Amino acid sequence: MNLLEAILLYLAGAAAGFVNVNAGGGSFITIPLLVILGGLPVTAANGSNRLAILLQNLMAARNFRNHGFRDLRQGVKLGTFAGAGALIGSSLALEISERIFSLIFSVMMVLMLLIILRPSRESSCHHSQETLRRPVLQMAVFFFIGIYGGFIQAGTGYLVIFSLCMLGGLSLVKTNSLKIVIIATYLIPSLTIFIIHGQVRWIPALVLAAGTSTGGWFGTTFAVKKGDRWIKLVLAVAMVAMAAKMAGLF
């Protein structure tokens, strides 16, 4: 990886970190870029991306705390259930061939877009409450989210938003403050498995991590200051960006 490729990877990471904190789906861009710019095999890109997302979320969590969102216990609790699932998902990701993983990754991009763009019959995310509904159901849901996140990671943010906001009734700002703690928590065991199996390439991962951390920091400030209305705008932009990528427009 030369200097220009490193700069492009950093900038892409910054954009992905901003989108990930406010919505999700940035890994649908960063994983392919780790392959293209970093020269990584697909499995190593999948593993290396997790280091960047973990550091991004740790940085974002600190900034959310600076803005008064300090409910770490609930995020860690749900993240622990997700972490149990992530151990299963990460192990599966290491067992299959890179060709099959690439095919699954492409299919998941299509399916995730269908889920994101599917119209809702109720305005379930127009909430302002700070107490999570259906806590027992949330634990079960996050175990399965962890399996998906451990396997592919990309798009997990949307699943977390659906669970916390639409099922749990939290505001989008509160949802995003918990989301980064949950994802950071389950990424620790997931990343550990990829490291043990030698599927993390440290230089591209750290370059990307520098970008995602920068984007995550600014993304949390944006989320807190602009509120739910602007977070929804970022969600819409992220959806359009992924649709354009799938159509081969960039």
Image (cartoon, rainbow, N blue to C red):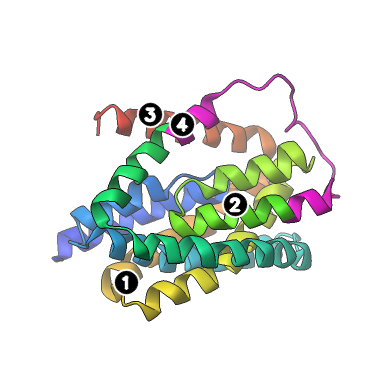
| Type of the residue with mark 2 | Ile
Task: Identify the residue at image location x=64%, y=43%.
Answer: 161
Marks 2 and 4, Cα distance to the nearest angstrom?
17 Å
Residue 145, numbered label: 2
Number of residues whose C-alpha sits closer than 10 Å to that of mark 2, classed few (under 14), some (14–19) or many (20 or more):
many
Residue 226 in view (yes/no): no
Question: Where does the image place residue 238, in percent across and percent down from the top left?
Answer: 46, 36
- Element class at badge 4: helix
Question: Where does the image place residue 217, in percent across and percent down from the top left?
Answer: 53, 59
Magenta region includes residue 4: no
Q: Which residue is mark 3?
A: 243
Residue 113, numbered label: 4
- Range covered by the magenta-colored residues: 111-139
Q: Earlier in the sequence, mark 2 or mark 4?
A: 4
Marks 4 and 1, Cα distance to the nearest angstrom?
28 Å
Question: Where does the image place residue 30, in percent across and percent down from the top left?
Answer: 34, 52
Label 2 with label 3: CB-CB less than 8 Å? no
| Type of the residue with mark 3 | Ala
Label 4 with label 3: CB-CB less than 8 Å? yes
Q: Earlier in the sequence, mark 4 or mark 3?
A: 4
- Element class at badge 1: loop
Marks 4 and 3, Cα distance to the nearest angstrom?
7 Å
Q: Say left or right for 175 vs 7.
A: right
The C terminus is located in which quarter?
A: top left
Q: Which residue is mark 1?
A: 199
Magenta region includes residue 121: yes
